Structures are given as structure tokens and as C-alpha cells.
Image (cartoon, rainbow, N blue to C red):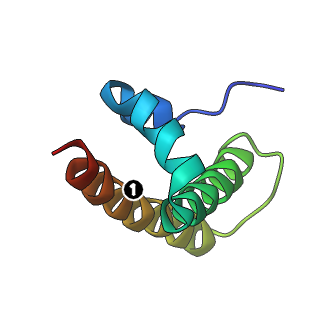
């Protein structure tokens, strides 16, 4: 399988350890991280043409990923403070 870009540890390399910690200790963060991971994989499958999707569907997935990333970034900033 090819490398999937935009994984959380790549998006927030300075918080890789904190991401791991929060995934194991914070159920809400873990749920957001799992949702991000699923949406990110879906986008990668569409981008690599493994899975067909309309332009509208791809755009919706990208918006979902951006929203999840924003929520995760806010939680990381709060936890790192």
C-alpha cells in the first residue's frame, strides 16, 4: 500500500508524542483522530483513483478533513499549553 499523505503525525510533527498520549487518554480526541484518519484515507483512495467519487464528494471529504484538523489543532494547542 502506498503512503497516505496528511496523517496527523505529519500535519503536527511537533505534537507526535502528544497525539499518541491523547489518543490513549482522551476518548473525545481519539474519536476525532479516528474520524480524521478515515476521512483522510477516503480522500487518498479518491486521489489515487482506487475509488471513484464525484468532484462534489471529494470536496465534501476535504471540508470534513479540514474541520476535523481544526478541532484537533485546537485540542492539541490546549493540551500543550
Q: Residue at x 59, y 48 (%)?
A: 24
Query: Which one is nearer the viewer's eye here, 79 or 73?
Result: 79
Image location (x, y in percent) of residue 28? 51, 68
Left or right of 40, for residue 53: right
Query: Which one is nearer the viewer's eye here, 36 or 59?
Result: 36
Q: Quadrant of residue 38?
A: bottom right
Image location (x, y in percent) of residue 51? 82, 54
Give the total of numbered labels: 1
Question: What quarter of the picture does the N terminus occupy?
Answer: top right
* Farthest residue, direction left: 81
Q: Residue at x 31, y 60 (%)?
A: 70
* Farthest residue, direction front: 25
Image location (x, y in percent) of residue 50? 83, 46
**As displayed, is residue 75 above or below residue 4?**
below
Image location (x, y in percent) of residue 47? 65, 45
Which residue in the protein does label 1 denote?
69
Q: Residue at x 63, y 53 (%)?
A: 43
Question: What quarter of the picture does the C terminus occupy?
Answer: top left
Left or right of 57, for residue 29: left
Pointer 1 local density, CA inside 10 Å: few below 14, some 14–19, many at least 20:
some
Label 1 residue SS: helix
Left or right of 13, for residue 44: right
**As displayed, is residue 5 above or below residue 42?**
above
Q: Residue at x 27, y 50 (%)?
A: 79
Query: Which one is nearer the viewer's eye here, 41 or 59?
Result: 41
Left or right of 72, for residue 20: right
Q: Quadrant of residue 3?
A: top right
Amino acid at each position: 500500500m502506498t503512503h497516505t499523505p496528511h496523517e496527523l503525525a505529519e500535519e503536527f510533527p511537533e505534537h507526535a508524542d502528544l497525539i499518541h498520549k491523547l489518543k490513549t487518554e482522551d476518548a473525545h480526541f481519539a474519536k476525532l483522530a479516528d474520524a480524521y484518519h478515515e476521512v483522510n484515507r477516503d480522500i487518498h483512495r479518491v486521489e489515487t483513483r482506487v475509488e471513484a467519487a464525484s468532484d462534489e464528494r471529494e470536496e465534501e471529504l476535504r471540508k470534513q478533513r479540514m474541520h476535523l484538523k481544526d478541532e484537533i489543532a485546537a485540542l492539541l494547542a490546549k493540551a500543550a499549553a
